[in-house]
Amino acid sequence: MRVLVTGGAGYLGTHTCVALMSAGHTVVAFDNLSNSSREGLRRASQLVGQHVPLIEGDLLDPAALEEAIHATQPDAVVHFAGLKAVGESSARPLRYFDTNVSGTLNLLGAMDALSVRRIIFSSSATVYGATEAVPAREDHALLATNPYGRTKIMVEEILQDLAAADRRWSIGILRYFNPVGAHPSGKVGEDPRGVPSNLVPFVGQVAVGRQKMVSVYGDDYPTIDGTGVRDYIHVMDLAEGHVAALARVAATSGVNVWNLGTGRGHSVLEVINTYADISRQPVPYRIVGRRPGDAAVSYADPSKAERELGWTASREIAEMIEDHWRWQSTNPDGYGD
Ligand code: WQD
C-alpha cells in the first residue's frame, strides 16, 4: 500500500517508516520538521534501500495537506504529527488544542475531500489518566489529567463520531504506552529537542555525559522500590504494531482501539540500574519530589491487539536499553542538525 506518514521524520515516524517499507509498503513523509530532522528520514531510507520522499508542511495549513494527499494518492494515512510534551501542554494549552485537534481536523477534511478514508491514529496511554486501574484495557474509562491527554481523548472521540456517521471510514486508534529504544542498527533513534522530559532519553544523555544526573521523581510510591512503574515498549515493536494495524484497517471498516504495550512494568530505578549495567557507564541519580500528574503504576493489557492484530511486543527491557545505548553512544549529539 501507499502510506502517507504525518510526523514521518520524527522518532516514532522514522521507525514506523522502516517497518512499513520492510513489510513492502511505499511511504511518503509529511512533516514540518519542528521536532524532527531530514537526517533521520535519510538514514531510514538508507536502512531499507528505499527512498522516503519528504513533503515539508504543517497540519495547520489545509492547502498543504490537500496538496500532499493529492500528490501522494495514499491508500492510508498513519498520523503521528502533533505535540506531545505533557508539561508543556499545561503551559501552552491553546498551542496543543490547535495543533493536535484542529490539525487533525484539517487532515481528516483533506482526506475526506480526496476520498482517502483509512487512518491509523497515534493515541497514548495518557488517556487512561493517573488511575490505578492496571492493567489498562481499551474499555476502561478515559480520564484526561492534562491538556495533552485531553487532545488525545478529543481526537479519539472525533474519530468515533466520524466512523459512526460514515461507514466508508476505516480507523485504527493505537494507544502507546512508553515507547523507548532505537533501531538495532544504531542509525536511527530518538533525538529530542532540548532537555528530554522522558526518562530513557534523559538517562541515555547522563550515560553519554550530556547531562549530570537523573532526578528521580519520587521514591514513595506503592511499588517494588517506591519509584514509578511504566510499560516500556521497544520502538520497533511499536512500529511493527502499526504494520499489523494497517493490515486490519485495510481489511475492515469502522473504528477499533488497541493498546500497544508489553503488559509488563519496570520501575525508574530498574531502568537506571539496567542502563548503567548495559552501558558500563555511571548513571548518578538523586531522589526528588513527585512530578505532578504522574501515576504510580501504568501498564497495558495487550491481549486485544494480540487477539485481533496477531501482534505481540517481543523485545524485553534489556534489548530496549541495549539498542538505545547503541544509538546514544554512536550519536552522542543525535542527528546533529
Ligand atoms: C516515566 C517514569 C516518571 C523523567 C509520558 C507521556 C505519555 C508518552 C510517554 C507521549 C515516570 C519518571 C521521568 C525523569 C523520572 N508521551 N521520570 N525522571 O510520564 O510515563 O509518559 O511519555 O505520548 O503520553 O505521559 O513517561 O518517561 O516522562 O516518565 O523519575 O527525568 O520516569 O516519574 O515514573 P510518562 P516519562
Image (cartoon, rainbow, N blue to C red):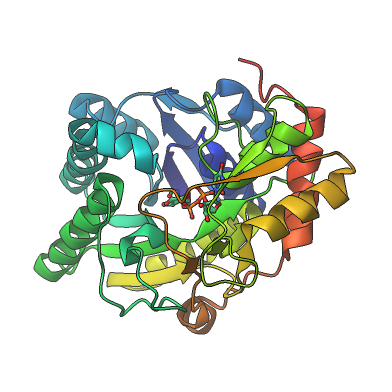
Q: Residue furthest top?
A: 337
Q: Is residue 102 left or right of residue 8?
A: left
Position of the C terminus by quadrant? top right
- Is residue 61 something one can see in this rendering? yes
Q: Residue furthest right?
A: 280
**Identity of the residue drawn at 49% across and 73% down:** 300
**Identity of the residue drawn at 48% across and 26% down:** 54
* Image spot of residue 45 (x, y percent): 66, 33
**Identity of the residue drawn at 52% across and 23% down:** 194
The image shows residue 109, relative to residue 158, as above or below, that is above
- In this rendering, the count of numbered labels is 0
**Identity of the residue drawn at 63% across and 62% down:** 267
Rendered image quadrant of residue 118 = bottom left
Residue nearest the viewer, comparing 28 with 266: 266
Rendered image quadrant of residue 7 = top left
Q: Is residue 23 left or right of residue 77?
A: right
* Image spot of residue 51 (x, y percent): 62, 31
* Image spot of residue 58 (x, y percent): 31, 26
Residue nearest the viewer, comparing 166 with 195: 195
Q: Residue furthest left?
A: 165
* Image spot of residue 215 (x, y percent): 59, 41
Q: Is residue 236 left or right of residue 254?
A: right
- Is residue 116 something one can see in this rendering? no
Q: Is residue 140 left or right of residue 274?
A: left
